[in-house]
Image (cartoon, rainbow, N blue to C red):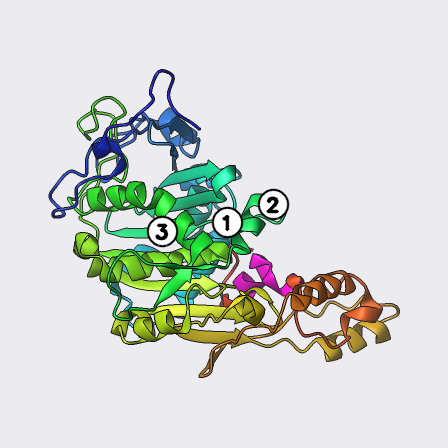
Amino acid sequence: MFAQPGVFSPAVSEIVPTFRSCGDHPGPGSLVSGDRKVDGVAETTERRQQAGRATAMPKADGLHVSDAEAPSYEVLRPYGRSAGDADRFPVYKDLEEHLLTTHEHPDPVVAHVMATCAGYAYSDAETVAMIMARLGLEDNHCRTISMSVDGMLIDSTAHLVQSRSGRVAILAYRGTPPLNGIDWLLNLEVEPEQINYWYGEPCSAVHAGFYRNVRATRYEVLGALMRACRPGPVRVSPHDGSEADGGDRVVDGALDALYITGHSLGGAMAALMGVMLRHEDKFRELTGRLKAIYTFGQPMVGTPQFAAAAERDDFLREKVIRYVYDKDPVPHLPPASSGRYQHFGKEYRSTVQRVSSSLFGLLDRGGGACRPRSGDPKYAPLPTTQMPGLLGLVLANLAFLGNKFTLTRSLPMVYSFEDHLPQHYISAVTPSDVPNEFGD
């Protein structure tokens, strides 16, 4: 699907770019037009007002690519600058510098930014670019790469956000949309699959559905990242596969800091991409630029042998940061009845005091009290384990329904899909003195 008319077999160079060094061009690609410049290069007011509108172009290799420029702060402030606006918008004034200079993870600012980016990865390039501008990456560019093949249980979407200077990039994978049956089927495709390179354990294997989906968009994603290393924009000219179109984005610096994030299925894909960058030789040029991987509500991606091999890698052990929100069932998947799986990396877990909150609500004349959820993430030395069987998913659905009523909200529960929603993860990691992505 998405093939251009008359194109039946794309060239090999279009599907598998050559990765030699950051100075090599990764091969032809398709991009969008645009004449926006940054860092001292003139741009028109009209163009700045149009920023944020995405354009899309299908590719002959089955991928669909769209690009969006973040709207300017003038556009995001339609009523002008208010007295207190300077203190609350954007959320982080020096976000790019913070992402470049942070070395200890988890970091509260980085966690907040990654959780928000992962949550909005369920949207499109325009929305992701706009939200990341609100957080502090002014004049960012977002390239969205996706492939969907229902029969193969492939529904892979990656958002690649590049900062104005080009020195920071955030790769955010979309998770499982609640009403997407294909994504739920691939989540249940739990049969392990052997990875296609030596990983230190001859019997290590990964979740077949997750592995297939991260590979579906991997080469286009890595091609864009390699362009950022040159330095250059993550997009290329739609005419000749180069950046010399006179109207494409201009960046000053080469990629220095790469972060990967995702929620749910997106978190699983983020973790697997991190493993690939660390262990596949052809991606070695990007390894030193990878700063951290933050995942939220991530299921397990591999067997215990795979997890053990990952734990022997210093980066995967220390810089893969997993967040688990209270009774979220997804980090307990796949169930033990489907085979043995295990997490790797550092886990931070939130616990919510539901009983006290519900009792206070009942005392307030029928549940009108406003008591926001608590649950600051704490380091968990023992990782989340598998649920015994699929009955846990049934209980998680019942708990989700029960959470909608005051009288049943405080009942003890083992799992609840309510806790898997990305907004709970964003709230849990937002620093107490920091406004949300809308500056409120």
- Amino acid type at circle 3 is Leu
Between 256 and 393, the one nearer to me in the picture: 393
Nearer-N-terminus badge (3/1) = 1
Nearer-N-terminus badge (2/1) = 1
Residue 229 left/right relative to 33: left
Residue at x 12% of width, y 47% of height: 20
Q: Check the picture and name the quadrant holding the C terminus.
A: bottom right
x, y percentage for residue 130? 45, 43
Q: Check the picture and name the quadrant holding the N terminus.
A: top left
Q: Please tell me whether mark 3 or mark 1 is closer to you in this view.
A: 3
x, y percentage for residue 239? 24, 21
Label at residue 171: 3
The kind of secondary structure element at disc 1 is helix
Q: Quadrant of residue 180?
A: top right
Q: Quadrant of residue 205?
A: bottom left
Residues marked 2 and 1 touching at CB (< 8 Å): no
Nearer-N-terminus badge (2/3) = 3
x, y percentage for residue 327? 62, 71
Q: Main secondary structure of the magenta part?
A: helix
Residue under numbered circle 1: 120
Whether residue 88 is visible: no
Separation of disc 2 and disc 3 at Cα?
Answer: 25 Å
Separation of disc 2 and disc 1 at Cα?
Answer: 20 Å
Residue under numbered circle 2: 181
Label at residue 418: none
235 to 57, vertically: above or below: below
Residues marked 3 and 1 touching at CB (< 8 Å): no
Between 25 and 362, the one nearer to me in the picture: 25
Q: Which residues are magenta?
A: 418-428
